[in-house]
């Protein structure tokens, strides 16, 4: 059953702590993305990756880091430098960046600072 | 810079009504436009993808149209059902930054039984 799996579904972070959100896809997609969603706002792009071992900053990359060591995996680390990390995080993938590519999303991780 | 807006922000209709959701974008240079559905606390489910060369796409009770010249897309839902209640988002893939997808803020739809 192909798709995108995000884990955990809920995550709690203490002040000053780094946490890592997992995103795995078995769709054989080249491109992967991380978005942040806050209440009343649209999705904002954090980081994206078009191929293995390569990634670019999105619109709100400060306080976040990523890696793309494998095609199927694109973990996101929320560092202590991110001052307001409480949000809903969505991972997406697409076959590539061509004109006919369709984006597919995981079920999200809700991160809360306690 | 490409911006995407959606009107209305929220909509409540009685079951059985036909309805239209609107999406506007500021730069007509796009590769495609995609409509998504999001249930509370869930990820996004792709509904329809319209290429820039297409005028509309249909899937079941859903029909999406695209008018690139005016920077508009509409999502038409026929014979609405309570199960259609969700937030609907549109997103465009700009030609100037084709590796990004720009999202609108969404329309929250509530279908009343």
Image (cartoon, coloured by chain):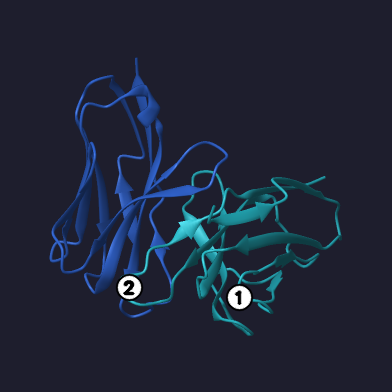
Chain colours: A cyan, B blue
User: Are both tags, 1 and 2, on one chain?
Assistant: no
Image quarter in which the N terminus of chain B is found? bottom left
Q: Is residue A51 shown left or right of residue B3?
A: right
Tell me which chain the residue with mark 1 is part of.
A
Badge 1 vs badge 2, beta-carbon distance below 8 Å: no
Identified at 20% across, 68% down, the residue is B52
Q: Which residue is mark 1?
A: A71
Task: Report the disc number at residue B105.
Answer: none
Tell me which chain the residue with mark 2 is part of.
B
For label 2, the crowd category at 10 Å Cα-Cα, with few meaning under 14, some 14 to 19 and many 20 or more, is many
Mark 1 vs mark 2, foreground winner is 1
Image quarter in which the C terminus of chain B is found? top left
Furthest-front residue in this view? A1
Q: Is residue B96 shown left or right of residue A41?
A: left
Of A91 and B21, the residue lying toward us: A91
Q: Which residue is mark 2?
A: B94
């Amino acid at each position: 059953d192909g798709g995108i799996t995000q884990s955990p579904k809920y995550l709690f972070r203490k002040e000053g702590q780094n946490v890592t959100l997992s995103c795995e896809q078995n769709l054989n997609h080249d491109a992967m993305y991380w978005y942040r969603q806050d209440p009343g706002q649209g999705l904002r792009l954090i980081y994206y990756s078009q191929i293995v071992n390569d990634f670019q900053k999105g619109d709100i990359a400060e306080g976040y880091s990523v890696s793309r060591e494998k095609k199927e995996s694109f973990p996101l680390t929320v560092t202590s430098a991110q001052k307001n990390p409480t949000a809903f995080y969505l991972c997406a993938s697409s076959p590539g960046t061509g004109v006919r590519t369709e984006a597919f999303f995981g079920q999200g991780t809700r991160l809360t600072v306690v | 810079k490409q911006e995407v807006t959606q009107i209305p922000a929220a909509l409540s209709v009685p079951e059985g009504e036909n309805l239209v959701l609107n999406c506007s974008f500021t730069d007509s240079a796009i590769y495609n436009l995609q409509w998504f559905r999001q249930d509370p606390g869930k990820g996004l489910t792709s509904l329809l993808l319209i290429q820039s060369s297409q005028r509309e796409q249909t899937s079941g009770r859903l029909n999406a149209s695209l008018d690139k010249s005016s920077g508009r897309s509409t999502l038409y839902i026929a014979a609405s059902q309570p199960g259609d209640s969700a937030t609907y988002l549109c997103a465009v893939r700009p030609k100037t930054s084709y590796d990004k997808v720009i999202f609108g803020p969404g329309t929250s739809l509530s279908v009343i039984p």
